Image (cartoon, rainbow, N blue to C red):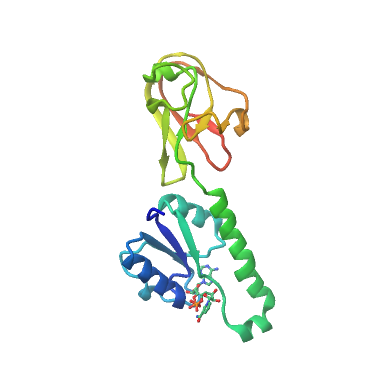
Amino acid sequence: MSKVPVLVTGGAGYIGSHAVLALKDAGWPVAVIDNLSNGSRSVVPDDVPFFEGSIADRALIDRILAGQRIGAIMHFAGSIVVPESVEKPLDYYANNTLASHALISAAVAGQQPAAVSVPGSLNSELGCAGDWMPDCPQAQLALDPADGIWKLSVPNLPAGNYEFKAAINGSWAENYGLGGAANGSNIALKHDGGPVTFRYDPASHLLSTR
Ligand SMILES: NC(=O)c1ccc[n+]([C@@H]2O[C@H](COP(=O)([O-])OP(=O)(O)OC[C@H]3O[C@@H](n4cnc5c(N)ncnc54)[C@H](O)[C@@H]3O)[C@@H](O)[C@H]2O)c1
């Protein structure tokens, strides 16, 4: 496995902080999320990106997964005091079971493809050898880690009526059309000429232009 960035949840706690050190020693890029309910910021090395907040905060998790290009998660965040868990079982259910479910849901939804392209009738205008080429280098979008959206800015697309789709990993095997539908209809663009930016959202599979 290549050394993808690892998100350590509960990385300011007892087990998580040692996992962070072991990962760093082994050369893995690491980031930490911890709400500091039972951890300490000071045990996380200064050169490790630290995010204070809950694993149940979907917006925060989405931002970390995209922004840090996380490829794996080691999950140690949770509540661990056995007598307290007997007194407050619902609190423990919420923080251990429901919050873990939220984290895993975000991880599943946040999986990014290796490549996204915009095959269509505009490919030759982009400099491709022909149209409808999902593997054309000039038709590839790039992932913006700030918001997890794939983008391709074309500085000057000639005026015309174009059609296109989103293709995943450089082939037609997985593609999305109108409304983000798998194998859906072509998306139409009536363009007056000039700059246009293609935006693909991997969560909804919607491909839009601005
Ligand atoms: N300590 C042990 O000996 C031991 C042994 C076996 C398994 N474990 C397991 O390892 C895990 C971690 O245990 P620990 O001993 O390091 O506990 P810990 O309390 O030291 O660490 C847990 C960390 O998670 C953080 N946290 C709690 N809820 C959070 C949330 N919703 N979002 C973000 N951060 C949150 C806390 O602030 C804390 O820093 C637990 O699942 C525990 O059951 C621990």
Q: Position of residue 138 (x, y in %)?
A: 38, 26
- Judged from this view, the residue extending furthest toward the bottom is 83
Q: Quadrant of residue 100?
A: bottom right
Residue placed furthest toward the top? 160
Q: How many marks?
A: 0
Residue at image point 43% right, 35% down: 151
Measured as percent of width and height from the top left, residue 4 is found at 40, 54
Horizontal placement of 50 versus 78: left or right? left
* Picture layout, residue 187 above or below residue 76: above
Point out residue 75 in the picture as x, y percentages from the top left corner.
51, 66
Residue 81 location in percent, x, y? 58, 82
Relative side of 21 to 83, left or right: left
Of residue 114 and residue 67, the one placed in the foreground of this image is 114
In the rendered image, which quarter contains the N terminus? bottom left
- Which residue, as the protein is rendered here, is positioned at the far front? 1
Residue 173 drawn above or below residue 90: above
Q: Residue at x 33, y 70 (%)?
A: 45
